[in-house]
Amino acid sequence: MNTNQKVRVAIAGLGFGSEFIPIYQRHPQAELVAVCQRSADKLKEVADHFGIKGRYVSFDEMLKDPDIDAVHINTPIPDHAEQSIKALLAGKHVACTVPMATSIEDCHRVVEAQRVSGKHYMMMETAVYTREFLYVKELRDSGQLGRIQFMRGAHQQEMAGWPGYWEGLPPMHYATHAVSPLLALAGTEAESVLCLGSGLINEKLASRYGSPFAVESALFQLKESPVAMEVTRSLFETAREYVESFDIYGDRMSFEWQQQEHEEPVVFRGEAGAKVKVPDYAHLLPEEIRMFTTQGVYDGDNQHLSFTQGSGHGGSHPHLAHEFIASIIQNRAPFPDIFTSANWTSAGLCAHESAMQGGLKIMLPDFRY
């Protein structure tokens, strides 16, 4: 694509997806041309609010539009794989909110669809574009962390009251927020996992997916690395404030996430620890969208619940949109690319499989065949 051209984007799913509308509208190399929502009333409300002409209640009909170059999918989790495959095979670049899929088979199908189509696929993982992640990445890249010795991630969230497909979802089926920052900082992929389930959720919840555990906690071995990582995930009936956290332990410096939302993380140099104010990284973005690292698109009453609970996802949204657009303009793989996205997703799926088999060691599939 010529760098003077703009990527023509459509957004599917206008709950969480609405958070990205003004980012694409303001991005200097993007043009938001259409939105898609099954509910006609919701579609009209959002499209009218943002002045969007292209409107679809059918995802399949939207894919027939030749004026759309790329589709950003923000639909319910069970739809991600099928819609990504359809969009790729329709010749559209795809950005998809997490996770890529809910089965290993579907991860393989999305990877194959990307190979056949030759189009870009990027899983829009907020955790690897937060200001906290970018700060620790800077510490790593500058050598201040030294050698990484161990990593720990957690994502604990109470999902009661969310849409029905969430009810009883196995904790590790949606583990990318906890897995991804660790693997990104380690610069490698997960190779194997053993995981234990802990506690029990009520029978009505457990019967939905056949998953009884309140918490799943996993140990991962990494490819070509001496480092291991631990990941804990819970979705129901576990008393804890919402947290997406990671801890990184190096031989020169370590970083530990804060216990509560409005506190500050701690950096250790040797045995001495001190709280640190993590900077914003809006300067990495085009000037037109820098404002979105610190504000949402609506007022406080209308923000999506995940955005509110996650404190704006660490300012990650404009970074994600910019990376997707830039990768298309520059004709390069995005980060995360198709293989990384599949590995991060399958890490959680394999962890749950291990938990259901009492902690059996499971090897992750190789998607780079």
Image: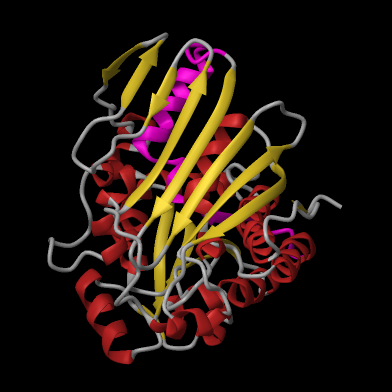
**Residue 288, percent across and down?**
29, 43
207 above or below 140? Answer: below
Closest to the observer, 60 or 145: 145
Instruction: Tell me if I can see residue 97 in this picture.
Output: no
At a point 58% along the width and 82% down the height, the residue shown is 64
Residues drawn in magenta: 117-146
At a point 27% along the width and 90% down the height, the residue shown is 41
Is 140 covered by the magenta stretch?
yes
Tell me the quarter of the picture where residue 10 sits.
Answer: bottom left
Relative to residue 228, is residue 140 drawn left or right? left
**Residue 207, percent across and down?**
52, 84
At a point 70% along the width and 39% down the height, the residue shown is 221
**Residue 104, percent across and down?**
72, 66
**Residue 303, percent across and down?**
21, 64
Q: Residue furthest bottom?
A: 40
16 above or below 256? Answer: below
Is 69 covered by the magenta stretch?
no
Relative to residue 133, is residue 209 drawn left or right? right
Closest to the observer, 267 or 356: 356
Relative to residue 120, is residue 156 drawn left or right? left
Tell me the quarter of the picture where residue 60 sits.
Answer: bottom right
Instruction: Tell me if I can see residue 213 in this picture.
Output: yes
At a point 81% along the width and 50% down the height, the residue shown is 368
